[in-house]
Image (cartoon, coloured by chain):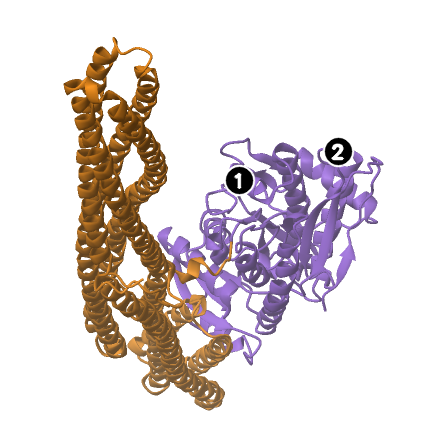
Chain colours: A orange, B purple
Amino acid sequence: MNPWAALNTLRTRIVMGEAALVVGLVVVAVIGIGALRTVRNTVTRELASLTAVSAANNRLVTTLFEQVRAAEQYLTDGSVEARNAFRSGGEAAHTYQRRLQALPELSESDRLVVTQVGVLQAEAEVLYSFAHAQQDLGRRGDAQSGARLARERATEMLRLVDLLSMSQSVGAEATANSLEQAATDREMLVWTVLAASVLIAVAIGVATLQSVERPLTRLAAAARRFGDGDLRPVALGRMPSELAELGEALDRLGGTLRTLVTEVVEESERIASAAEDLSAISEQLAATSGDVSTAMEEVSSGAQRQVAGLDESSAAAQTLHETTEDAGHVSGRVAELGASIHQLAETYGSDIDAAGNTLVELGNLVQRTARQVEQLDELSEPIYEFIDLIKQISSQTNLLALNAAIEAARAGERGVGFSVVAEEVRQLADTSAQAAERVSGTITTIRDHVSAMTETMAAGRAQARGVGTVSQGAAEALRQIVTSVREVETESRRVAGQAAQNLTAVDNITRALKSASQAAQSHASSSEEVAAAAQEQGASTEEMAAQAAVLNRAAEHLRSLVKAFRA
Amino acid sequence: MLLVMAGLTLAACGSSEEPILIGLAGPFSQQRAQSMQLAAQLAVSEINQQGGVRGRPLQLVVHDDSGMADIAVRVARTLHADPDVVAVVGHMNSGATLAAARVYNSGDNPLVEISPSASSPDLSDAGPYTFRVCPSDSIHGIQLAEWARDQLGANRVAILYENDAYGRGLRATFRNSFTERGGQIVSDDPFSNILPSFEPYLTRIRSRGGADVVLFAGARDGAEEMLRTLNMIRYQPAVLAGDGAAGIETADIDAEGVYVSLAYLHDQPGARNEAFTSAYRRIYGGQLPDHRGAGAYDAVYLLARAIESVGANRARVRDYLAGVGDETEPYDGVTGSIAFAANGDVVDRDVVIAIVRNKRLESVAR
């Protein structure tokens, strides 16, 4: 099997085209939905991590500032509030540092900075506590020098905290950029896949339409020609296998019709010539029968004369002898002619039988052809089903595209590109539906031509049936001719036999005159019988001539019937 | 700095079976981790002499983490990635153990770690595969407060805490526990190596009516410096220190009478401990094990028992350990009875309060 044969069917092409479109759409939809989901998830995740980190960071910054402020305040006023604020600020700062460190979203570099902030804060806390102790002991100078050391750490710590905030905003920006890049990449992918699938679907669609429309036009023209009676072969060319099957059926139909018409023409020619021959022989036969009749009448009158006067017997016997001899000769000639007619009739009888058989075959052929034409009609059904399939897929695609458009509208700004795509897809589905409608129209035209052809075929079948009846009549006529001829032969033989007997009787006249009267009587009755037979033969011959004329008319009719076809 | 050593296996059983691998991770290039390594090796050789585990010898895969979090993470990744390693004894200090715990608890095939000595309260939530055989700092804080209030009868306590996770944690639990018992915190001051001097803190304590006890929550260096300052200003309050100050007894200053809370002390009572210390002393030339060594020794035996019972499978070993004290009997170790709470901490474990006498630590009878 040729692996490409499957590709050459309408079904495969249509299914492939639609499948390419549907697969493309599904891929686009999956990528699109996946992209939207990924972007949404990523945005949610990144926002959550940014929020978590920046919240912890903000609290840390606030408590650190509060602690430093309280430490400095205690150095100036030594108040219990400031001391407590310094302590609680420090504890809170440690807590927030630990929380920040525990966040998995914290970048490695930020983690290092937070660690460094922790170290500096611990040192600043120790140094401020030291300064506070000196202050409590009234050692202002030592307290101030301790505080200076603490401030160095605090300044560095607050600088690092600033850096941390900055790094976070940079991180947020980088996240936003990477999100945007990811969204752009996916959009490009969606556009590429969509364009590719639309191109493939359009290419397959156009190819399929062409491979349907062109062969259909050619088939329609061929069907129209056949319908008009032009049965010459048609070149249909390459086409999809379903339509090729249709074309082959049409071609077979044409071939069968051509053979049929040729054979009918030949047969009608043969029948006509047979009828002519038959009529010529009939005429000859009629003429001969007239001769026999005349001779027999003479015999009869001679016999009567013999019965009337035996006196004239010697002269009459002589005349009788001669006449009887003539009658024997004529009867022999009649027998010969009868045999020849018999032979002829038998020859033409078998010819006409053959012609009859051919006509029966012809009738069968026409019936078969009619069935093929009906099959042709049935063949267009699956094509209608394919067209329905296309329409169905189109309407589903249309619905899918509408849904996609609604989803795209729901996706808002991000879905704008996708909604344009969905509209394109919907229009493509409409175009498919229109194309299917057009194919459907063409199929209907073909069906019309096919049914016209079916009618023509029905007429042809009726005509063929007429021809059959005629040829059956001809055959019957011939059979009757043969029967008649056989009777003539029998009668001729009887005439010849009687003539021979007569001769013997005449020879014996001189020897047995007593029996002459009886012999003459029987002679006379025999002669009457011969005359009657001859008359009968004449009637048979006339009947035969009439049948030959019928045959000739039938042959003419047949010829006029087949003249309508051009083989 | 990653030091990889082939584990010491005294394959006395002569077994030709594939050894069962157990990781041992700690700062073994440092003096403070020596006892941990020696005790772990002692436990392994004892177990192998008795025929190993399920007929297979135990073998230690030793990695040095320098006591630092980042190196500990690298070590943990190596051990985690080796499917033949069934469990890890380590790490020694809290920072390294915490950092490594994130690695051990991750992936499709997490790895059990049993720390002999990491005491940070943060370790309680480190993950289902993280265990420790020592009490956490909060236990130290609570029991030091009990000791100060109930045994020393202290009313006024001054706290000096190292401004790091350990010092702040110990200080917080002590402070809460002590005030709950009706005691008074008269001062609460942070220090670190940046502190110019302890003198202002100590002078202020004395000038404000003094303290019955000074609680020192920090490492040994700070404790030494503080004791030196107390001597200098001739102020002699009772001094109570957390286990971070262990080692102060051998310092070149007068630390006599200082109380130190310890997870374990070699002279603590118990037949298992006596057998362990005498074997240790015999094999290692008269040295004595510290609490890290004792913890490592107990951890190796616990793992051997788990593998004997459920096979050399990481997840099953973890499930077995989680059921110790619950589904199975508590383990009677050299550090005491070991049972695990749901968070992997050892439950109902008392700390040992020791006192420095003649430059040595001795358990104080309660």
The image shows residue A489, relative to residue A457, as above or below, that is above
**Residue A58 image-quadrant placement:** bottom left
The mark total stands at 2
> Residue at 17% across / 52% down in the picture?
A459
Q: Mark 1, chain letter?
A: B
Q: Quadrant of the C terminus of chain B?
A: top right
Which of the marked residues, 1 or 2, is nearer the chain's N terminus? 2
Furthest residue toward left = A308
* In the rendered image, residues at marks 1 and 2 fall on the same chain: yes
Q: Position of residue B171 (x, y in %)?
A: 46, 61
Q: Position of residue B182 (x, y in %)?
A: 36, 53
Q: Are marks 1 and 2 in contact (CB under 8 Å)?
A: no
Helix, strand or loop at mark 1: helix
Q: Quadrant of the N terminus of chain B?
A: bottom right
**Residue A237 image-quadrant placement:** bottom left
Q: Amino acid at mark 2?
A: Gly
> Residue at 38% across / 50% down in the picture?
B181
> Residue at 36% across / 38% down in the picture?
A340
* A45 left or right, relative to A470: right
Q: List the residue tagged with mark 1.
A: B319
Helix, strand or loop at mark 2: loop
Rendered image: mark on residue B55: 2
The front one of A187 and A307 is A307
The reply to whether residue B176 is in sight is: yes
* A224 left or right, relative to B68: left
The reply to whether residue A52 is in sight is: no
Q: Amino acid at mark 1?
A: Asp
Q: Mark 2, chain letter?
A: B
The image shows residue B217, relative to residue A514, as above or below, that is below
